[in-house]
Image: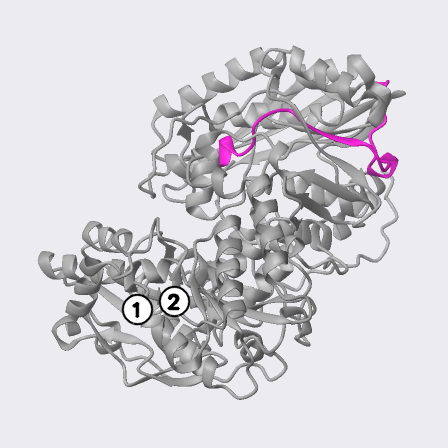
Amino acid sequence: MTTIERPPPRVRFDDAQIEMSHGAGGKASRRLVEGLIAPLFANAVLAKLSDAAALSLGGAAYATTADSFVVKPLRFPGGSIGELAVNGTVNDLAVSGARAEALMAAFILEAGLPTTTLRAEVEAMAEAASRAGVAIVGGDTKVVEHGACDGMYVTTFGVGKIDGRLTLDPRSVRTGDRVLLSGPIGDHGITILLARGELDLEADLSSDTRSVWPYVSALLDTCADSVRWMRDPTRGGVATSLNELARDSGLGIVLYEEAVPLRREVRGACEILGLDPLHIANEGQFLAIVAERDADRALAAVRAVAGGEGATLIGEVRAEPARQVLGISAYGGTRVIDMLVGDPLPRIC
Amino acid sequence: MKYVDEFRDPELIARAAQEIARTAEPSRHYRIMEVCGGHTHAIYRHGLRDVLPENIELVHGPGCPVCVLPTGRVDDGLAIAQHPGAILTCFGDMLRVPGTKGTPLELKARGADIRMVYSPLDALRLAVDNPKRHVCFFAIGFETTAPSTALTLLRAQELGLRNFSVFCNHVTIVPAMRAILDSPGMRIDGFVGPGHVSSITGCRPYEFVARDYGKPVAVAGFEPLDILEAIIMVLRQLRAGEAKVENQYRRIVPWEGNPVALRAMARVFELRPYFEWRGLGFISQSALKLNASFAQWDAEVQFELPGIRVTDPKAAQCGEVLKGVLKPHQCKLFAKECNPEHPIGALMVSSEGACAAYYRYAHRGDPVSA
């Protein structure tokens, strides 16, 4: 067996304990992963910290990813934990330019979980996998004492072959590139918030959980060489994903605030609760940075796929303000759009 | 969206901005204080400084309930959370406010039962649903939130609920405005008056500002056009050499206030002789406590609280920022030791805090590395 040389790790994480915000997908999550986990695992593949790890196997490039799901409640309008677990991993692969070819699933189940609940979730996973054209080929099952987890947690692992026409790298992003968003934001996060029933708010809203591969695939068939970067803006929302891009590319991202597609219900809930929709999680949308010359063709391609009609160009890449995301309103007011700080909606996926 | 879109209409905003530029005398520098943290947030959130001429300076006032709460009171609240069987409930803003031994969130991560609620009635419901636990509501806020606390206590009384209490930290805005007007070296030309507070109190309580201090007040709503219109009202008064209270937020604020809410408050609360405000010190008759007939729901009566006064970290200049003497970025700790993830002062915590608003929406310096 060969041992890999291990350079002395440089851990930079001072928080004394783990808090919910470390799992919220914003700044604290990023500090935990970059400051503690990545330095200890230190390797070149992980250092990229993208949605999926790119591995070269037998001359071909593969994307691999794992994602855990702890959403509460287990079922909500538009989906459930099982469906999320399949779509979440399929989407992490999709925004890495790979169609999911196989998934694995690991379950942590609580003693006392009704079999009907488990069966419903396994069926939801089977259906979502079949819709995404992928098989679930393996996994694991563990049971913990009653009260040790909220019913069930699911972890999925996925692998897919990366489309050879594509090179995704934040450093390839150029000023003038456009920001493409696949559809209205915030549906998932707000749906979960309302489904918890802790607020006296109701809205006709459902989670946007779906595979984004059909849209990504259409985009790649149209202009793969103009696509520079993709992300699915889950926890932490569009604002957090774009801040990561701004940081990793060294460039500024400018958003036209009025262009960001938003359902009336999500906008209303966010206004009432003081939340920024740009920080709310999505489970069926993706962001792409596309070269200016192909931006309109890219948009048309995504819109031509059923369910992609809401796609919009929401912003552009500029040299300034470097490493920041700036929102511009229709009347010329500007604001810095920061990453999510803290934890507005815990356990949404 | 109704009541939102028409107040963010780009054309109307451009016209209001032109009117402000026309009304302001070019040779004069104006300092207008927005009293309320909700306004501070809206000003930064909507980038309103970008549409105002340079000689109009907006000065951020003390109207952020989380920001003015002194550390000692946070410690007292957290002491309640450590009683066996207690559930401490509070608004989301409170969760990240540092006490001496950490924030409510840190305490929660260590096992204390601290829960966020959107309304004190949610806390009451929690008490009804958990008869074996004691549920305490950490009440903060100006007259905006005090009526809902009052109604909740009246409901608790009706139900004869024994496992519920309120840790009352409600404050009133008028004494704080007076303290600012009296503070030496404070030059304010006029006020954008609080909107939601005034929906309860009405506009009369601000008449002393115009009468005794000769400063214009325009009570305003929270949308971009509301704030711009209130600024126009203040500028017009200054230009005409007038000082009066005007009501820009007529769609919400009745001149005489909300008599039902005021009656509920009068039944439940009484004025404290004095109360400590962060940055402003002790201000007489500036806060509310439960009156004697609600003693059995008063956490300050039911629990033994440390009640220790804690001074702010020396380097933090929260007081100067709260009084409008310093801008957030002029504080020595701003964006360095003190940032939204690790706030040292409460102004960096609440979305209504001037420092958090400035940091989130206007700070163009080097982003703090994630």
Q: Which mark is residue B204?
A: 1
Query: What residue range appears in magenta?
Result: A164-189
Q: Quadrant of residue B60?
A: bottom right
Q: Check if residue B72 falls in the magenta segment.
A: no
Residue for point 47% across, 73% down: B99
Query: Type of residue at label 1?
Result: Arg
Q: Which mark is residue A150?
A: none
**Quadrant holding the N terminus of chain A:** top right
Q: Within 10 angstroms of label 2, few (less than 14), some, or many (20 or more) residues? A: many
Query: Type of residue at label 2?
Result: Val
Give x and y (percent) for residue A266: 47, 34
Q: Which mark is residue B245?
A: 2
Give x and y (percent) for residue A229: 78, 31
**Relative to A11, is A67 above or below?**
above
Please check whether the numbered discs 1 and 2 fall on a single chain.
yes
Q: Are marks 1 and 2 in contact (CB under 8 Å)?
A: yes
Q: Chain of mark 1?
A: B
**Relative to A230, is B289 above or below?**
below
In the image, B145 versus B176, the foreground residue is: B176
Secondary structure, mark 2, is strand
Q: Check if residue A175 falls in the magenta segment.
A: yes
